Image: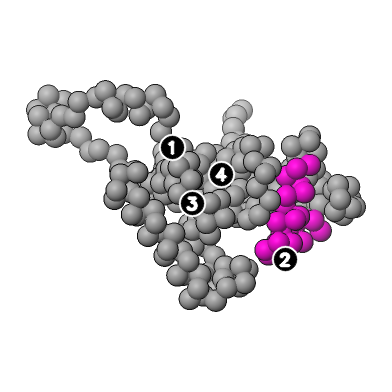
Amino acid sequence: MSITSTRPAPLMTRLNSEWTTQIAAKEYEFGSLGFHTAGAMLAQIRAVKGARQDELLYELVTLAHQGDRNSERVVLQSLFPAAQRMAHRVRSLEDFDRHDRVGYAIGAAWESIRKYKLHLHARVMANLTMNMLGVLAPEKTANDRFIADKTAPVATDILEIEAGSWEEPMRTPEEQLANLFTWALDIKLVTTEELALLSRTALSDEKHADIANDLGLSTACLRKRADRIRARIAAAVKEGL
């Protein structure tokens, strides 16, 4: 007699199966958006951009904060592509296998929805995505900064003599950008809208032409605007603000 053990299906596989078999075809009331099947609601989100997409997502996120799990589930499903991209880009997840990385990114998507700041009405998808990145590559805590401030650096050659050679872990570009963007927003160096624009041009897979079209700008104007925001942040960093 042989006993075989099977690993549970990956989280995304299970959620996609649940969506297809139990959720997508059912009709729900989505607040001011009216009655729609979950699948039709998701299709609308993916088919539109700009203010209309913001309107759809903001209403669903608001309903989710009020305890509407159906609305929350639609928003979560809309974030799956971003979760898959981040799962393979954020170095802090490298110790996990592929399926666990995606599962962790889905958890970040869920947290992003539940902690969304409802005063942010515009660029909702960009804000949700940035929140996910913040969960996956968080800024250092006050305690981390305190320890760093109170720790005396030791020359690498001395440390190798005392403890053997080692490789200092490198912060990923995603972690550096997340911390930099959070800092710039905290000191009011940039607005939420500017940060959303910079995040889309720097972190997303969207083509600049598509982002420009969504914002009603020419591609050249989009690049100039992003360059000005980057220059402002770079100048502040250089001046030690």
Q: Nearer the viewer, mark 1 or mark 3?
A: 3
Is any part of residue 58 visible from this angle?
yes
Q: Main secondary structure of the magenta part?
A: helix
Quarter where residue 41 is shown: bottom right
Q: Earlier in the sequence, mark 1 or mark 3?
A: 1
Q: Secondary structure at mark 4?
A: helix
Q: Which residue is mark 1?
A: 139
Is 184 left or right of 105, judged from the image as shown?
Answer: left
Rendered position, 199 above or below 148: below
Residue labelled with disc 2? 47
Residue 66 among those drawn in magenta = no
Q: Position of residue 97 (x, y in %)?
A: 47, 42
- Label 4 vs 3, first from the N-terminus: 4
Q: Position of residue 164 (x, y in %)?
A: 15, 29
Binning the other alpha carbons within 10 Å of mark 2 as few (below 14), some (14 to 19) or many (20 upward) gives few
Q: As drawn, is 151 to the left or to the right of 21?
A: left
Observer-nearest residue: 80 or 219? Answer: 219
Q: Amino acid at mark 4?
A: Asn
9 with respect to 232 (left or right): right
Q: Which residues are magenta?
A: 39-63
Q: Are there few (<14), some (14-19), or many (20+) residues within 10 Å of tag 1?
A: some
Query: In the image, what residue type sits under mark 2?
Result: Ala
Magenta stretch containing residue 50, yes or no? yes
Spot occupied by residue 31 in the image (x, y as percentages of width and height): 86, 47
The answer to which of marks 2 and 4 sits earlier in the sequence is: 2
Q: CA distance from mark 4 to mark 3?
A: 16 Å
Q: Residue at x 57, y 67 (%)?
A: 211
The residue that mark 4 highlights is: 131
